[in-house]
Image: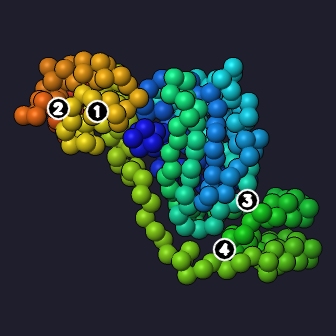
Amino acid sequence: MIEQYLERLFTWESLENTERGVEFELKNRLIEAEFEGVTTAKIDGEAVAPGDVTLELADERYTAAEVTPAEPLALDLAETVQVVLDRPRLRLGVHEIELGLRVEGYGEVGFTTDDEIRPDDLVDVDPADHTVDELRGLVADVTEPESLERLLEREREGKNRTTAVAALEEALEAAEPLTDAEMVRSEPTTTDSGSNLVNDLLVEVLESPQRVSVYLAVQALGSGTPEEVAGRTVLPESTVRSTLEDLEREDLAERTDDGGYGVVSPVKVLRKRRQDLWTVLRSTL
C-alpha cells in the first residue's frame, strides 16, 4: 500500500538522458519527511551504486551514500529533488525505475514505476563544440544508434574532422540496433501529467498535506473506513479519522452506509474552493 502512495513522488515524463547520465525528478506531493537513505536505485533491474546516485535540491547536492540516519535529507512539501544516475544512457522506449528509501519513522520503503525515453531525450549536442577526445568520451556510453547517427551527420555537415568522423563511425558500428520490441512505443503506467497537475492543485487548495493524502487514498479506494484509509497512507488511524470528519464538515466527504467515507471528485473540490484555486493560479502566473 505504501508503495502506491510513494509512487506519487515520481514526476512522470521527467526521465531523460543527459551528459551526466540518466536523470529524473521527485516531487514531494505527500507530507514533510526526512529521508535517511537510498536503499535501492535500479533501472530495468540493473542496480546503480549509492556513490553513483546524486540527489540535487535547489541549493544542496548529495550522493546517496551521504544520506544517512545521522545526516538525513529533509524534504518539505512541494520540494523537488533531481536524481542523477551516473550510468550509461538509456535507449528509446519505456524503462522501469525502482527506488528504495529509508524514511524516518517508517523504515525501508520504496516504489517501482516506469517512464519513457523519447527522441527528444537522446544525446543532442553539436560535435563542433567538443574536441575529438571529448567526443570520444561523450559517446563512450551511448548505445542508441539514432543518437550516434545524429552526431555523425552534424560532424560531417560541420567541421568534418577525419578523426571525429572515424570515432563516431566506430561507435555506430558497435551500437546494437533497436529490437522490434524496443521500437514499439509503449504507454507508461504512471499517472499522466494532467493528473499530476490536479494533485499539485489539490495540495495547494486543501492546504494540509495530510488532508490531500487522506483525500487521495479515499479516492483510490472508492470508499473506505478510517482503518482502511490509514492502511493506504503513512498516517495513523486517529489522524485519518479526524481528517475525514473535517472533510465531511466541508462537504468534501460523506459517510457511507457501511460506516466508511467517500469523497467528491477532484473537479468538485476545485469548484468548491474556486476562490482558493484562483489565488493559487494567480500567484503562479
**Disc 4 packing (10 Å; few <14; some 14–19; many ≥20):** some
2 vs 3, front mark: 2
Decide which of 112, 199 is in the foreground and name it.
112
Q: Is residue 209 left or right of residue 274?
A: right
Which one is earlier in the sequence, the residue at label 2 or at label 1? Answer: 1
Q: Which mark is residue 130?
A: none
Q: Quadrant of the C terminus?
A: top left
Is disc 4 in contact with disc 2, using a CB cutoff of under 8 Å?
no
**Disc 1 target residue:** 229
Which one is earlier in the sequence, the residue at label 4 or at label 2? Answer: 4
Q: Is residue 157 left or right of residue 268?
A: right
Decide which of 234, 32 is in the foreground and name it.
234
Q: Please state the horizontal and vertical placement of residue 72, each as a whole percent of the image.
A: 64, 23
Residue type at numbered disc 2 = Tyr
Is disc 4 in contact with disc 3, using a CB cutoff of under 8 Å?
no
Q: Quadrant of the N terminus?
A: top left
4 vs 3, front mark: 3
Secondary structure state at the residue bearing disc 1 = helix
Residue type at numbered disc 1 = Val
Cα distance between the residues tagged 2 and 1: 9 Å
Which one is earlier in the sequence, the residue at label 1 or at label 3? Answer: 3
**Disc 4 target residue:** 146
Is disc 2 in contact with disc 1, using a CB cutoff of under 8 Å?
yes
Rendered image quadrant of residue 234: top left
Residue type at numbered disc 3 = Pro
Residue at (35, 48) in percent of width and height? 194
Residue type at numbered disc 4 = Glu
Which one is earlier in the sequence, the residue at label 1 or at label 4? Answer: 4
**Disc 2 packing (10 Å; few <14; some 14–19; many ≥20):** many
Residue at (88, 77) in percent of width and height? 166
Q: Which mark is residue 88?
A: 3
